[in-house]
């Protein structure tokens, strides 16, 4: 008998021997991770619930299903990230990317690609690293890869949208329920906390944010503190020299070795503690199709750290939860519809994808407005011009270790454009029809803030951060949303139309924009949906 209650010991024995043979020769890191979180992707196994992906949506689903007594297996294409490398650290530093940093690339693709006009990217060994810079025709979409999904790489900014904006974020969802129950539940589950305002006033590492505040307020913009999942007390100890530095050592993007409460420390730790959740890292789902005896057959490639397939496995599940992220879930679903594996998915699958209006820029300050050589990598504040100009700008760090006199911002903007994923059968891949020119409304919205600040301060935009004489970082997003939109591709709780027992439970449900950073909304929506699904379907 296995943890799922099914007796399949014979096939399990054979497959496990094959699995272990693979891990010992190629996947040492996976073998170690199995001690922390038992891995059980066993060829031929039947499980009650399979979750594809271990980010926010997947972690909420796994925890709540397990608490309801359901055994869950999670399949994750990225690594476990629980084993130190040769330098004794699990995660690489932002200033010195190495093989741990990028997902199967031979050269880094840093979001901020240039400095003083010089390109920053460098060669790295091809490896299943933590940050995927996935390139589509008109946009590069950054995503976390590994057990914990985007929580491994992100800045931890944990923002609940203003209630007056919620109707535009998720029009079919009851705001009273979200603000009364699910946002508070998500914030508690994620360990969201807020910086001590008194410490903020004196901390050397937030001089850049105080300069950002001064400029925002002198131009009449509201400046707001932004909650985060980073442990602020830990950061105080970093500053005092009594704890190993992470945020104050510039760690971000490629993982934080200390201080940040990623999903590994929150939802996934609780899921593990139930004893009902197992996880297989380096397992990439390639197909889901109805199984002969009911439920769904899930095909999964086990890959090595070079990205090569070392085994192809097949599992069966009564219920399958798509939590591969907006891009991962959308790509899978358009492929499965087009290839006939899930023929009854409707025409909404693939549609309604947006970039949360992300656009970046920098400003060059005067010499009397130094932003500090020591900058915490965790942003803690933003400029709110959403109502008047359609932009919410994070005052972001530039943790270079030297004084740059630069202010750097990631803006979230109201951008009306929505793209669609389609399956290109000839090329054998999913494509996204986003166009770079569609960022213009985002640039215009960001300019409502920064043109005014520049005019007031007598300053200019930096032109050296995204190329040679290029002001706007308009080629990327950190916040992919949509592709299997709630109430269109699915019902109002994420049940995919056409195939009972299949659910979407990640950022793919959200139609393209959250008006702030998205993961609290993704988590809260997952909490809402899984509660309904457990009550009604199980
Ligand atoms: P996600 O967390 O992406 O998890 C999906 C998981 O599925 C990943 O682990 C994938 O590796 C895995 N996967 C994909 N395809 C497959 C497959 N075929 N088989 C098996 N596994 C698969 O999805 N948001 C904020 O709210 N605040 C921030 O400060 C913030 N900063 C960010 C900074 C960066 C650099 C980036 C990249 C993102 C940032 N975000 C931030 C966005 C946030 O991390 C993102 O919205 C969520 O992680 C999305 O959650 P999901 O559950 O949708």
Image (tube, grey):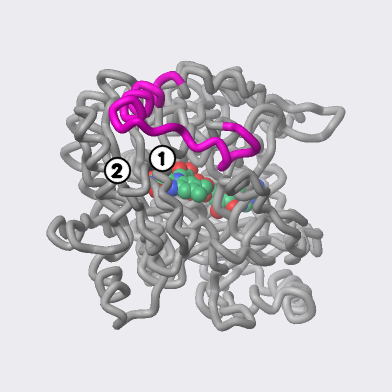
In the image, residue 181 sits, relative to residue 400, either above or below, namely above
| Quadrant occupied by the N terminus | bottom right
2 and 1 marks in contact (CB < 8 Å): yes
- For image coordinates 46% across by 41% down, the residue present is 506
In the image, residue 46 sits, relative to residue 463, either above or below, namely below
Mark 1: few/some/many CA within 10 Å (<14, 14-19, 20+): many
Q: Which residue range is magenta in the image?
A: 444-470
Magenta stretch contains residue 91:
no
Q: Is residue 224 left or right of residue 39?
A: left
Corner quadrant of residue 250: bottom left
Q: SS of the residue at dot 1? A: strand
Q: In the depicted view, which residue is nearer to us: 129 or 118?
A: 118
Residue beneath disc 1: 409
Position of residue 265 measured from the top left corner of the image (x, y, whole percent): 38, 67
Q: Residue furthest left?
A: 198
- For image coordinates 24% across by 63% down, the residue present is 203
Q: Is mark 2 within 8 Å of ligand 1?
A: no
User: Does residue 533 show up?
Assistant: no
State the mark number for residue 212.
2
Position of residue 505 measured from the top left corner of the image (x, y, whole percent): 45, 41
Position of residue 121 measured from the top left corner of the image (x, y, whole percent): 68, 53
Q: Is residue 507 left or right of residue 533?
A: right
Corner quadrant of residue 90: bottom right
Magenta stretch contains residue 450:
yes
* Distance from Cα at disc 2 to Cα at disc 1: 9 Å
In the image, residue 395 sits, relative to residue 268, either above or below, namely above
Q: Nearer the viewer, mark 2 or mark 1?
A: 2
């Amino acid at each position: 008998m296995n943890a799922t209650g099914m007796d399949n010991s014979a096939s399990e024995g054979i497959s496990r021997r094959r699995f272990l043979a693979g891990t010992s020769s190629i996947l040492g890191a996976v073998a170690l991770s199995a001690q922390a979180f038992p891995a059980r992707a066993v060829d031929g196994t039947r499980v009650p619930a399979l979750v594809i992906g271990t980010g926010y949506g997947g972690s909420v689903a796994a925890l709540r299903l397990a608490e309801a007594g359901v055994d869950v297996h999670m399949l994750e294409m990225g690594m476990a990230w629980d084993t130190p490398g040769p330098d004794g650290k699990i995660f690489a530093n932002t200033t010195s990317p190495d093989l741990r940093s990028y997902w199967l690339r031979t050269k880094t693709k840093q979001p901020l690609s240039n400095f003083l006009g010089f390109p920053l990217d460098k060669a790295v060994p091809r490896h299943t690293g933590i940050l995927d810079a996935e390139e589509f025709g008109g946009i590069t979409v950054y995503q976390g890869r590994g057990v914990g999904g985007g929580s491994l790489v992100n800045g931890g900014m944990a923002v609940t949208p203003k209630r007056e904006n919620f109707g535009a974020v998720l029009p079919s969802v009851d705001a009273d329920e979200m603000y009364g129950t699910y946002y508070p539940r998500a914030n508690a589950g994620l360990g969201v906390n807020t910086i001590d305002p008194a410490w903020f006033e004196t901390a050397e590492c937030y001089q850049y944010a105080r300069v950002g505040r001064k400029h925002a307020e002198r131009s009449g913009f509201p400046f707001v503190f932004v909650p985060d999942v980073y442990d602020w007390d830990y950061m105080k100890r970093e500053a005092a020299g009594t704890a190993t530095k992470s945020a104050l050592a510039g760690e971000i993007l490629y993982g934080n070795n200390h201080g940040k409460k990623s999903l590994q420390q929150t939802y996934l730790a609780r899921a593990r503690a139930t004893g009902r959740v197992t996880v297989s890292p380096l397992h990439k789902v390639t197909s889901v199709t109805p199984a002969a005896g009911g439920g769904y057959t899930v095909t999964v490639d086990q890959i090595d750290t070079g990205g090569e397939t070392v085994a192809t496995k097949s599992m069966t599940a009564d219920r399958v939860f798509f939590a591969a992220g907006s891009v991962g879930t959308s790509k899978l679903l358009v492929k499965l519809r087009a290839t006939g594996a899930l023929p009854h998915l409707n025409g909404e699958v693939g549609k309604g994808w947006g970039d949360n209006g992300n656009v970046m820029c920098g400003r060059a300050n005067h010499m009397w407005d130094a932003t500090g050589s020591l900058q915490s990598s965790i942003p803690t504040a933003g400029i709110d011009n959403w109502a008047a100009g359609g932009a919410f700008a994070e005052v972001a760090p530039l943790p270079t270790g030297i004084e740059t006199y630069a202010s750097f911002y990631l803006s979230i903007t109201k951008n009306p454009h929505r793209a669609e994923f389609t399956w290109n059968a000839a090329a054998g891949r999913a494509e996204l029809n986003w166009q770079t020119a569609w960022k213009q409304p985002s640039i215009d919205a960001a300019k409502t803030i920064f043109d005014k600040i520049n005019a007031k301060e007598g300053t200019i935009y930096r032109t050296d951060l995204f190329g040679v004489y290029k002001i706007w970082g308009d080629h990327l997003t950190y916040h992919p949303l949509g592709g299997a939109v709630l109430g269109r591709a699915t019902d109002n709780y994420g049940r995919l139309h056409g195939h009972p027992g299949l659910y979407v439970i990640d950022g793919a449900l959200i139609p393209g924009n959250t008006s702030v950073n998205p993961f609290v909304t993704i988590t809260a929506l997952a909490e809402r949906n899984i509660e309904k699904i457990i009550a009604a379907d199980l």
